Structures are given as C-alpha cells and as structure tokens.
Amino acid sequence: MSELQDNLLQKIKDQGDLVRKLKAAKESSEKIQQEVTKLLGLKAQLGKEDAAPSKFVLKTPKGTRDYNPQQMTIRNNVLQKIITVFKKHGAECIDTPVFELKEVLTGKYGEDSKLIYDLKDQGGEILSLRYDLTVPLARYLAMNKINTLKRYHIAKVYRRDNPAMTRGRYREFYQCDFDIAGQYDLMVPDAECLLVVTEILNALDIGKYVLKVNHRRLLDGMFEACGVPADLFRSTCSTIDKLDKSPWEEVRTEMINEKGVTPEAADRIGEYVRLNGGAELADKLLQDDKLSKSKSAIEGLEGIKLLLHYCELFGIKDKILFDLSLARGLDYYTGVIYEAVLTQPIKIGNEDQTVGSIAGGGRYDNLVGMFDSKNKQVPCVGVSIGVERIFSVLEAKLAAGDISVRTSDV
C-alpha cells in the first residue's frame, strides 16, 4: 500500500469519526449529509487508487516494525525484569504454536473475533494466527489434562487492528502473560495477579499508574437492573469497553442504534459507569435499590470487597480503583477483571499522548471446559503485560534523554 493510500485511509477514518460525532450530538441532517458526502468521496478516491498500478515501496507491513540494537537492549531489559517477577511468584514457562486450528479460536473473543488473522488452507487444516496467549493456554490445559499450573508465557500475537504505532498499538506485538490455573481460596490468586502487575510496573519505573478493577457478575447485574435483555449483555459489554477511547455520548449512541438497547436503559447504565472508588463504593452499591435486587450484582460486589481486602493485606490498596466503567470486551471473562493505565500522558515529539492500557486480565473459569469433551472446568485467572506500550514509554524517555542504554553490555 502506498503512502498516498495510507493517508487516504486515515482521512476516511477521521471523516467517519466526525460523522459519528455529529450524529451523537444530534446535529442537523443537512450538516450530517454534507460530511457523509465528503466521506463517500474519499472512499471513491481510495477505490481509484486501489485500481491504479503503484510502484513497490520497500517497508515493513502496516502495524509492524523493526528494532535496532539500542531498542532491543531496552526491550530485553524490560523482559528480564518482567520474567524476574514471574519467577519470584513461582511461575513456570511454557510455549505454544504461533498458529492454532481456527476452531480453537472461534467463539472465544466476541466482537473482537473479526480481528483474527486467518491463514490460507494448508494441507487440509484451517488455521489462524493466535490472537492472545490465553485461549492457547486453555487448549494446552485441556489437551494435557492439567488441573493446576502457575505459568508465564512471552510471545508474539497478531490482531487486524487499526495500528497506532506511537501509542504502542500494533498488529504484531509481544504479550507477557502470567496465569494461575486451579482451585484456590476465593480471590487470593486474583489479588496475586494484581500484586504481580504492581511489582512489574514499580520495577520498570515508567510513571504513575492505577489498577482499575471490576467484576463481570456485577456488570451482568447492572445490565439486568437497567433493563437490558440477557441476550444483549455481551454485546453491550463490548460497547462499554470503548469508554476508555470514546466519550459517553458516542458509546450511548452505539448501544441504542447498533446493539438494540433502549434509550432509557442506556441512560440508567450511564449513571452507573460514571462511578468509581474503593470498598466504600461497593458498600454503597450493595444498598442500591436496583442492584440490591440482583443476585449477580450482589455476588460481584461481595467479590470486589474481598479482592480489595486482599489488596490491602498485600500493601497495594493505594494502587487499586474500583471502576464501574471497566468492561474488557472479551467473551471469556467470568469474574474479576482489571486493567492498569498510566495516569499521566507521555511526551512523544512535541505532543503529550496517552498510552492507554499497559496491562489487563481477569478470571476465566469456563474457558478450559470449552475444549474438554466432558466440559470439565479448571478455574483460571491471569494478567497480560502490554510490553509494546511500556516500550513506547521508555523509547520516548530515551528520545528525551531521560534514560541511556549501552548495546554492548556483557
């Protein structure tokens, strides 16, 4: 794809965002139609570019990059610190194939399934590049009849996402996963995963951060209390997951126009997703007129209270924020979910940019059973460290002269 085509695609994306914002703001139909006409013109222009022969340009594929020796030194230092924390917590390393049978990945990611890279048929097997390291772990546990394991896995994964290179969002990128499989006391392994994240981020010293936590059962109870039909829970959850990137009005519009949620239900959801705090918020919500009538919501809130109690015992309570807007769109989560975000933007060139999530995970108790002929469940919880986004922060610090590296250290 030529640079001109890349520019056109970006213009199309920006124009599409503008049209959605105008619709969300309920601008006049005339103004919206003007911008839609511009959008269609850009798409027509792109079609002409695709048809025209273009000169081959030598470059890496979109959403990928090379790493020079200096960058690799930073990367290796980051990975070494992460591995040290994983091993400290007793995790063992495993590896799985970079591609899986497509059937293994199908139906595990909800709306994100469209981001999976499918491979052409080779030898009768329909294959896909792995989207994450969690589903391959579940397949590994089921295949090998393993009921208890504490593991870490560092490897590349692939997603057909819209890349944002400066913010550390790629189509090919490393994930660093830590997971605990097996039956343990409620919320103890979940809190340990949060402890692992804090130890890693403290060791890397990349800036101030907060760990947001929520519970899938609470989200289900919230949707139920707000009048969302049960068959729309997962798709509504995927829309709520966009709140870290889009304003509430855009999310509300998508829920109503694309997901089939009523305006009244969407407004009630909006009242809840603005809330965040600590154990006192969980206590307050347990007294909420609507949520207190939902068994799912009560189960989720009691789980959050217990999680926060263990976080206090581990000495990490000040890093944790109970946030009702946290959803994590993947279908396989069943309990606690969490996400680490930097609280300050980083300077890239002359601009301050937010990096987004630098770690995320949660509990997925039903995933292993999907691969077992007898549907035998293995409770699991884990976290994935977003090493590419962490690397983008350190690379910005290197460019600013805040850190230095030596590529030939022995």
Image: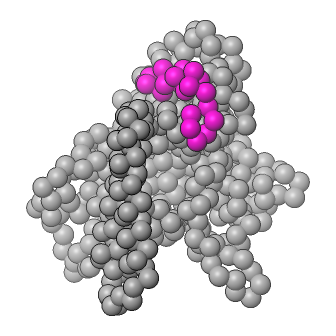
Q: Residue furthest front?
A: 30
Q: Is 199 rendered above or below residue 261?
A: below
| Residue closer to the observer: 52 or 220 | 52
Task: Give the position of the C terminus as an image quadrant.
Answer: bottom left
Can residue 350 be seen at all in this image of the molecule?
yes
Task: Give the position of the N terminus as an image quadrant.
Answer: bottom left
- Seen at 41% across and 65% down, the residue is 43
Indicate the position of residue 86 as horizontal and vertical percent values: 48, 56
Indicate the position of residue 49 as horizontal and vertical percent values: 38, 78
- Report if residue 207 lies within the magenta region: no
Seen in the image, is 104 located left or right of residue 262?
right
Q: Within the image, what quadrant is residue 47 found in?
A: bottom left
| Residue closer to the observer: 25 or 365 | 25
Seen in the image, is 86 located left or right of residue 72?
right
Q: Within the image, what quadrant is residue 321 found in?
A: top left
Q: How many marks?
A: 0
Q: Within the image, what quadrant is residue 407 found in?
A: bottom left
| Residue closer to the observer: 388 or 80 | 388
| Residue closer to the observer: 404 or 291 | 291
- Seen at 40% across and 46% down, the residue is 33
Indicate the position of residue 182 as horizontal and vertical percent values: 70, 47
Seen in the image, is 322 located left or right of residue 117?
left
- Seen at 63% across and 35% down, the residue is 260
Q: Residue furthest right?
A: 374
Q: Is 53 rendered above or below residue 288?
A: below
Colour scheme? one colour
- Seen at 78% across and 59% down, the residue is 371
Q: Which residues are magenta?
A: 256-276
Indicate the position of residue 159 as horizontal and vertical percent values: 51, 65
